[in-house]
Structure formats: structure tokens, C-alpha cells
Image (cartoon, rainbow, N blue to C red):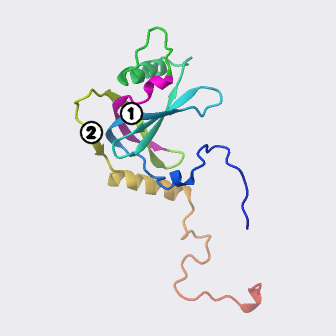
Amino acid sequence: MKITGQATHIKDTNQEAFLKGGDFLGAGEFTVKVKDVEFNDKENRYFTVVFENGEGKQYKHNQFVPPFQQDFQEKQYVEFLSRLGIKLNLPDLTFNTDDLINKFGTIVLKNKFNEDQGKYFVRLSYVKVWNKGDEVVNKQEPKTDEMKREEQQANARQKPSISDESNPFANADGPIDIDDSMLPF
């Protein structure tokens, strides 16, 4: 079968760039630099900050922009930008996203469980101020056995088991006897 289509979401035309694919930061604490700022929301509700550590592994964070519906969102916005060295003229929240490029910080990423999908996802918890001369941190926190069990249990609840009673082949230890007249071939 021939598959046809045109990319509508991917802007990169160099397919070699996709070979690295999985170089993403997991949960932990990492000294990073802002590599890029992306705009992929048609309604301009947020921008995406691309953080990269010294090993070239990345983490992308969506930062919501004014106007905010909740006070905690506004506080988080100001803290996020302040810790990355962006000077705001409060109460004005205006700044140029180009000023974020090459800013350093230490990001703390945590595993957060998503009930709907039954697995953990890495989320930005907060950014720490990083000053030149500070220790470079690259400390990953792997999933615990308890977290892995929780994902397995959630996954088992979402999918019917192969050994389900409705499966006539579930407990077949030997050959399956089906009369030849029942076979379509």
C-alpha cells in the first residue's frame, strides 16, 4: 500500500534531524540553556520554551501568556521569567521572547501521573536561578518500582486481558480442535 500526504505540523525538511528522536530529559534536576522559543498556538495563548542540557537532551515547556484567568498563572509567569533573568517592568508583563534565548537555569522536572492515560509524564515543577560559576547539575530520577506498578495496574484496567473469559482461546494449553467444516478455507 502506498501512503501519501504532506506534513502540516513539521517545519524541518532535513529528515536526519529526526534520527535523534528520543533525546529528551526525564524527571530530575538539570542545568539547562534556553535553546529556542517556538510558537505553535494559533490563538497565541502560549509559547514553548525549548530547554537543552550539556548533553543535548531537551525538555519543552509551554508557558501561558497574559491575560490570565487565575492569579497563580500570573505569579507562575513572573517567577518563570524572573528566574531565567528576564526583567519585567511590573505591573507590565511585556517582554520579547528573543531575550530568553541562551538564558541559563536549573529546571526541576517531576513525574506526574495522568489518570486518563494511566502513565507518568514529566512536567516542569519549577526553575531555579543559575549564575555563572554555579555547579552544573545533571541528576536524573528514574521511575520507582511503585510508579511502574501503578502504570501496569492502570494499563491492566484499561485493556481487556487476553485471558478474559470471553476469549475462547485463553486457556487452551494444547491444540485447538475446530471442525474443518467450520473453517472458511
Let me know if residue 101 is in the magenta part: yes
Vertically, is 18 above or below 75?
A: below
- Residue 99: percent from the left, percent from the top? 45, 23
Magenta residues (range): 97-114
- Tell whether 26 sits left or right of 64: left
| Viewer-nearest residue: 30 or 148 | 30
| Viewer-nearest residue: 60 or 170 | 60
Specify the principal SS of the magenta part: strand
- Residue 137: percent from the left, percent from the top? 27, 39
Residue named by callout 2? 137
Residue at the (49%, 50%) spot, across then down: 118
Label 1 crowd bin: few (<14), some (14–19), many (20+), radius 10 Å: some
What residue type is disc 1 on?
Answer: Ser
- Residue 116: percent from the left, percent from the top? 54, 45
SS for dot 2 = loop
Quadrant position of the C terminus in the picture: bottom right
SS for dot 1 = strand
Residue named by callout 1? 125
Residue at the (49%, 52%) spot, across then down: 21
Quadrant position of the N terminus in the picture: bottom right
Of callouts 1 and 2, which one flags the residue occurring earlier in the amino acid sequence? 1
Q: Quick check: can you spot residue 140?
A: yes
| Viewer-nearest residue: 39 or 25 | 39
Residue at the (61%, 45%) spot, across then down: 10
Vertically, is 128 above or below 160?
A: above
For residue 90, the mark is: none
Q: Quick check: can you spot residue 112?
A: no
Vertically, is 170 above or below 114?
A: below
Q: Quadrant of residue 121?
A: top left
